[in-house]
Image (cartoon, rainbow, N blue to C red):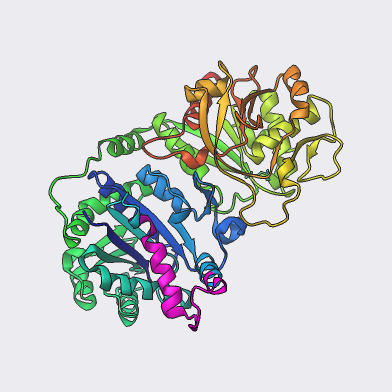
Amino acid sequence: METKYIFVTGGVVSSLGKGIISSSLACLLKARGLRVTIQKFDPYINIDPGTLNPYEHGECYVTVDGHEADLDLGHYERFTNVHTTKANNVTTGRIYQSVIDKERRGDYLGKTVQIIPHVTDEIKRNIKLLGNTGNFDYIITEIGGTVGDIESLPYLEAVRQLRWELGQNSLCIHLTYVPFLHAAKELKTKPTQHSVKQLQEVGIQPDILILRTEKDIPADMRRKIAQFCNVAPDSVIQSIDLPTIYEVPLKMHEQHLDEIVLKKTGENAEGEPDLKAWLNFLHKMDHAEQTVSIGLVGKYVELQDAYKSINEALFQAATYNDRKLNLVYVHSEKLNEGNVDEKLSGLDGVIVAPGFGQRGIEGKFTALKWCREHDMPTFGICLGMQCMVIEFARNVLGYADANSTEMDIKTPHNVIDLMEDQKSVTAKGGTMRLGAYDCVLKEGSKAARAYGSTHVSERHRHRFEFNSDYRDSYEKAGMMCVGENPETHLVEVVEIPDLRWYIGTQYHPEYSSTVLNPNPIFLDFIKAAIEYKNQNK
Ligand code: GLN
């Protein structure tokens, strides 16, 4: 079949969940045996979100090929179980960089380089890159931002042209918001009408409308929206707030979203998607009665999206262990010797989060010392693992001034240090150790047992590393380096075998955890937390 292109735009307000809708549609099409990928076009000028802080843009997700990407790519992978790559996330910065490079090379010689056609052509070329591989039946393209933004205009113009060129091989889904006015006790459709009008003004007629709402939208109101917006009544679909995002595919399927998309793009819509495994996950989620309480120690705990992939990996692991996840955020800046016992003692497990810089770091050491001394199941990820190593140096090896050179450039005990090939790097964008690397785990280690394998591949995003000069001292004192890169011998995993579950990974296992393929080390961590809880009671 010819590759089909589905465009997803958003209107009225931001944060409506275009990523979740795109992911849910992809999940349904995939469950019908189709080959699907999702890509996101972000209208900002940064080349990628790697240099944005979590206050700006939430978590930075990392693809296997080492691209620092928008967190929506995490949803895409969690819902579809298909890897994304650098080609799945393009920003205005990347588009302009490419156009300007071409101009300097002389590719446009003699021509005035303009937004239309040069920038729009570059956008179109990028939209079709994955389609041209022949690997996909459906390419879902999420256009970041909100219709009406100045920045989105070139993207919408590209979509308009592609809709025209591709005809039935494409369609546009527009996601809007139907607010409920509490004072008037009424749902309001006017913002949706205006938003669709704005799309029509730039020449795009949406084929399907998805309405985000807190309340059920009555059928006659949906018909009214259909009529005002030139959309077929059955193509006006509501997306009501749900307890978890993982129920969205089912709600979309109940309203025939997958069927409508197939029909409108000229494909056979008979049959049903195979959602057995997905439903099994939801069943477990609904029937879990007992809870497992995990503390997440980090400095961005007030931000919902800063640790997105960790939250989701924990949720998946808890669900597969038949538990409800009670995630307790522990602010590392506010943690000290005086309150650590009160903050951590009621928990069943603790995760120390990844991060950068000095802020909140002492609280992480305080948490780790308490966890180590109380034999609490503890998981350190990236900076969290580095903190495990530093805390052990300070309090077990007796190097009171041990540190990472990220925090203290002059530390005499640089147990965490810059990699040699990072020392000359000055540019910040895309220069860390990024993407998936192999790791060999020591036979019989807790980490190897958790994975059920001695060979794993996980994604990285860091500059600093365990300093192997100290490896012997650590191993003699009981912290073992149980995972290493087979080529560089960089230490990737440490653990204290004498403790219940005290493991630190230099890599980020959360990025590869999906609904249908939860990450084994998260599963094992939750299992250990449940055992600890049961022993404690
Ligand atoms: N700041 C640390 C480093 O660059 C850890 C990074 C992280 O936690 N992602 O090595």
Look at the image and tell me whether residue 88 can be seen: yes
Q: Which residues are magenta?
A: 102-131
Instruction: Give me the residue at 48% from left, 22% from top.
Output: 453
> x, y (%) of residue 457?
51, 34
Q: On the picture, is 455 further left or further right than 518?
A: right
Q: Nearer the viewer, residue 47 or 26?
A: 47
Give the vertical position of 26 relative to 167 (above or below): above
Q: Nearer the viewer, residue 148 or 37?
A: 37
Instruction: Give me the residue at 47% from left, 29% from top.
Output: 520
| Numbered circles on residues, count | 0
Tell me, yes or no, whether the highlighted magenta stretch contains residue 395.
Answer: no
> x, y (%) of residue 167?
22, 69
Q: On the picture, is 18 further left or further right than 236?
A: right
Ligand 1 placement by image quarter: top right
Q: On the picture, is 256 further left or further right than 105?
A: left
> x, y (%) of residue 263?
16, 59
